Amino acid sequence: MAAMAAGLRGLGGRFRWRMPAVAGGVRGAAQGAVGQRDYDLLVIGGGSGGLACAKEAAQLGRKVAVVDYVEPSPRGTRWGLGGTCVNVGCIPKKLMHQAALLGGLIRDAPHYGWEVAQPVPHDWRKMAEAVQNHVKSLNWGHRVQLHDRKVKYFNVKAGFVDKHTVRGVAKGGKEILLSADHIVIATGGRPRYPAHIEGALEYGITSDDIFWLKESPGKTLVVGASYVALECAGFLTGIGLDVTVMMRSIPLRGFDQQMSSLVTEHMASHGTRFLRGCTPSQVRRLLDGQLQVTWEDHTTGKEGTGTFNTVLWAVGRVPDTRSLNLEKAGVDTSPNTQKILVDSREATSVPHIYAIGDVVEGRPELTPTAVMAGRLLAQRLFGGSSDLMDYDKVPTTVFTPLEYGCVGLSEEEAVARHGQEHVEVYHAHYKPLEFTVPGRDASQCYVKMVCLREPPQPVLGLHFLGPNAGEVTQGFALGIKCGASYVQVMQTVGIHPTCSEEVVKLRISKRSGLDPTVTGC
Ligand code: FAD
Ligand code: NDP
């Protein structure tokens, strides 16, 4: 307590002294002084998972605090409350994806009778400013929501002092000590820089910067080939930039590889260049300000070079655990990934300390899973619930120019688990009606459903490549989560004319060898 008082004095009145909380109803806390701690729940990290957990606990009448602090990117980009999704992830990404899709619609428009002078230039500044303003409104909205629910928010960087106490350090160096009966770690992750590549940190940017650039990134090299890389490369190409993706192995590792190949095939046919089997070895700045990148081409064994205005590293993310002093609390992490190890109740190696979201080992790195895990955790802690988060059959969508939505197993996983002879795959190449009038190529519009072969053929996975894949997949995810079978999907009446109806019309199996191209209505 003396240390806490000293810490608070150090804050010079910015954080007011309060009497310690009386944590009514909290029983069996690991250490003494139950009822003497500041909060029932302290959440470290004000992103998707942390905010959801804090708000739910406050709704259940508990005394809750959230600490959130954004360490600026190496480029100096910083942002407000809300975490990765709001500031440097889903939200700005989807809006910039929308900007790119609009470019396609503008090209379609004359075919539908609109007299639009082509080509229509795109203004990065305008787009970025509009997106950034929206993000700032969300930052503000989160602060208001916390205030309305009486959740105390501290803009400090947190690290453990002991199992129940956290030290927060504000921007100016002032410190605060906060204690709680329960602590939830929801600190997410940050983009990884390939430290071994000369010039990578000095000259490259990451997804933490791209959405906050005031000027267009210009000719861009995107290194990596997963969600972040392909989505960014997709919208940058879509707004008219010269974009190259450097892929060292396969696209979208972990996803169905037939679908992933179609995603990159579509991108390539719409102007994104791909350097396959290549890894960068050096980035240096030329006298004219451009960045010269040298790479190894592992297929030919030769070295390649190219010049770009921007190099965007999209080579994965690292959990934000290093500054948490987890050892002081005894929280175990994976030695390989530094992610926090938890059980099915999201409990860490310390019973009253929990972890949710991207910072946790083995969890999907997605906003809705972090949010749901946070809510359920609060309900278990304070609402008498015993419901666990179910991470099975989590749907997701990759927002590439042609969107790829999926839920359940890939074809490869289904075959690996059940054997080729027990898996039936139904598929179709279809043409969205909207593509017909402007004569858009629909070669990559494809849907497949992976089922067990034995009747009633339970659906193991659904993969949809086409416009609005997120919207399509979300609906079917419910059915698949509820255990839908192929027979039930075939009994479902379609909505005409939509792309979703192609799912309920899947009659051709891969095994049959018949042409899966949809003809007619
Ligand atoms: P975060 O949202 O990362 O929040 C963690 C917070 O904790 C941050 O504000 C961080 O600054 C703070 N923090 C860290 N350390 C400390 C500390 N010591 N003290 C105080 N505060 C700290 N998911 C989707 O579902 N759909 C998408 O379309 C999608 N698009 C994405 C696009 C990109 C480019 C990226 C990078 C991610 C995307 N994601 C998407 C993933 C999604 O953003 C994350 O899964 C989600 O934000 C994870 O939430 P979280 O609560 O675990 O962590
Ligand atoms: P991933 O870890 O999924 O992918 C990293 C990519 O970088 C892989 O293609 C990998 O290649 C490549 N790579 C790694 N190291 C190097 C290197 N040294 N040189 C060249 N290439 C390299 O990371 P992401 O950042 O793309 O995504 C992180 C998570 O964020 C995702 O798993 C997802 O859950 C979430 N996210 C969700 C989105 C959505 O819901 N739409 C959008 C964006 C992100 P290789 O395969 O060879 O290892």
Image (spheres, rainbow, N blue to C red):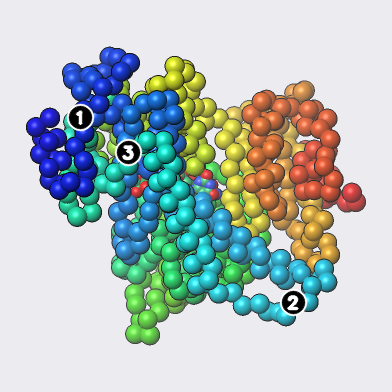
User: Which residue is disc 1 drawn over?
Assistant: 19
Which residue position holds label 3? 152
The image shows residue 411 at horizontal and vertical percentages of 64, 39
Please state if 54 lies on the left or on the right of 277 as rendered. Answer: left
Residue designated by label 2: 116
Dot 3 amino acid type: Lys
Q: Is residue 167 above or below residue 99?
A: above
Q: Nearer the viewer, mark 1 or mark 2?
A: 1
SS for callout 3: strand
Q: Nearer the viewer, residue 139 or 361?
A: 139
Furthest-right residue in this view: 520
211 sits to left or right of 160:
right
Q: Position of residue 27 (x, y in %)?
A: 29, 14
The reply, left or right, for residue 109 in relation to residue 145 is right
Q: Nearer the viewer, mark 3 or mark 1?
A: 1
Give whichever of discs 1 and 2 has the lower sequence position: 1
CA distance for labels 1 and 2: 66 Å
Residue shown at 79%/54% (left/top)? 432
Going by the numbered disc 2, the residue's amino acid type is Val
Figure check: 43 above or below 113: above
Residue 255 in picture, x, y percent from top left: 57, 44
Within 10 Å of disc 3 (Cα), the crowding (few <14, some 14-19, many 20+) is: some
Which is more foreground, mark 2 or mark 3? 3
Residue 438, disc = none
Number of callouts: 3
Is disc 3's CB within 8 Å of ligand 1?
Answer: no
Q: Secondary structure at mark 2?
A: loop
**Cα–Cα gap, marks 3 and 1:** 14 Å
